[in-house]
Image (cartoon, rainbow, N blue to C red):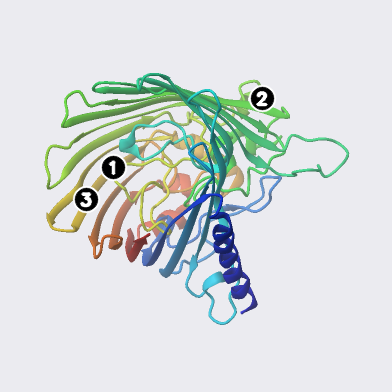
Amino acid sequence: MKRLFVLAMAFVGILGLATAAAAATEVRMVGDALVYGVYYSNRNFTGWNAATWTSAGSPAYKGAGTKTEESFQIWERFRVRTDFIASEAVKFRLALKVEDTWGHGTFTAANPSAAVMPYQAFLQFKVPGCQATATAGLQRVDLPHSKLFYASPVFGDNMAALVVKSPLYDKTLSVVAGFGRLIDTNRTFDPTTTQVADELDAYFLALPVTVDGFAATPWAAVAVAGRNANYYTNKSSQYGSSYYVDNLASAGTLLAPALWENDQNAFWWAGGAFEVSALDPVKFYADVIYGAGAQSDRKKNRREGWFLDFGAEYTGWDVLTPKVFGWWSTGEDKSTMNGSERMPMVRPNWGAGNGFLFDDSQELVKDSNVGMSPVGSWGLGASLDNMSFVERLTHRLTVAYVGGTNSARAIRSLNDVLGSNPYFQMGRDLTVDEHVIGVNFDTKYMIYQNLAAVVETGWAHGEFQQSVWGHRLVSRSRDGDTWKAAFGLSYKF
């Protein structure tokens, strides 16, 4: 009860601050609430847990298949975003959220453990004497990507960053530049009197170009990865299916000597996002990205690769919007000792059609997808979006086929040394002889203008190699497919 009181007082304090500030500033508050139940069967295609890293500073881990899933959970999330606007030139945003399952943490009856988490906290102002806008603090950062695919496979999430945006030429050309610190493991003091590189920093630049019927955004990003930052237990996906070490490092870094030789390694990406609307209502989308990292380190520790996607949609009908899409990325070759051939990522948030297979745009966010990796794979898909035959009722149907581009020998060789490990996981990482098929059907009914009933369903079937993942996991995956059915209420104010 005391913790609930503290939680209540925190929100009262925010409201009180807003009231006190009202005399000098304009205060705007918006928010949203989700309450939903999720039935999810056969997580990780087995109904068991995936392998996880257990130590922040070394490759210690627990294998898959040691815990059994709970098929049904009820989630609740509420968020409040408050803007304190001093003028048209200056504002500050504070955004807080509470998210947990019923019966756990904040939502435990009689003895709750309250947890209020800030997910945005930034100062935004216009730079005097020009049209540039600067934003400093915890904010949403998405590296450029065409809008058909929701967000970037390199980074799309909240980041503590300084971002400057400015128009350069009359609604045609602009610039976005930024710096962010993703990890600072030891913060003020390192553990001993010897300084260590325990940070992961990122720098990025984009030049959006828009002309009639065409938009292109060339961009580049550089990350400086300190050897002693916590890559093992910091998760690198919203769904929690991967860690920073999985997405940045090569498989060879897990073999002795572990991780990198250099104190710091540079990772860099260069790409372009393209959208063509000249043939409206037919629109085309494409992205090309090349990324590489640790190129001056030991050969086994290097990582580099390509990622391409493409898609089209027809927006000329009122009753539905058909879409088709595909992607391809380089995968591991036969050896783990010559580095990785998969494009490095930081925090991917990529997917199309609200699909069940990838961590992308699902509205009922928890237990929402399979969590597959977009790199080391290729695929094709189609979606019937915005289907509406009855007023206030919409549907979406998406089908996707995913194949692997990774050599079975590379994955098998690491599994032979480490056993079941978090770096390569069945169902998330596919060999050239494996595939997964996914289908999702989603429905939304607007009860009122701000209140919606949402249903999201998904099904996935995978075919996996026993010689790569072992008899136990593959045999279990053949016992049944993966299913999801979620129903809930979404309120926005």
* N-term-proximal mark, 3 vs 2: 2
x then y, percent, for residue 357: 35, 48
Q: Is residue 493 visible?
A: yes
x then y, percent, for residue 127: 55, 28
Q: Is disc 2 in contact with disc 1, using a CB cutoff of under 8 Å? A: no
* N-term-proximal mark, 2 vs 1: 2
Q: Tell me which amino acid carries mark 1.
A: Tyr
Q: Which residue was labeled with disc 3?
A: 397
Q: Is residue 405 above or below residue 235?
A: above
Mark 3 vs mark 1: in front: 3
Task: Please rate how many residues cluster around mark 2, counting C-alpha atoms within 10 Å: few if below 14, some from 14 to 19, many from 20.
Answer: some
Q: Tell me which amino acid carries mark 2.
A: Arg
Disc 3 secondary structure class: strand
At 20% from the left and 23% from the top, the residue drawn is 278
Task: Please rate how many residues cluster around mark 3, counting C-alpha atoms within 10 Å: few if below 14, some from 14 to 19, many from 20.
Answer: many
Query: For the view shown, which residue lies furthest in the top direction?
Result: 169
Disc 1 secondary structure class: strand
Q: Which residue was labeled with disc 2?
A: 298
Q: Which residue was labeled with disc 1?
A: 401
Query: For the view shown, which residue lies furthest in the bottom direction?
Result: 110
x then y, percent, for residue 158: 52, 44
Q: Tell me which amino acid carries mark 3.
A: Leu
Q: CA distance from mark 2 to mark 1?
A: 36 Å
Q: CA distance from mark 3 to mark 2?
A: 46 Å
> In the picture provided, is 206 more to the left or to the right than 316?
right
Dividing the image into 4 quarters, which one contains the C terminus? bottom left
> In the picture provided, is 368 more to the left or to the right than 127?
left
Disc 2 secondary structure class: loop
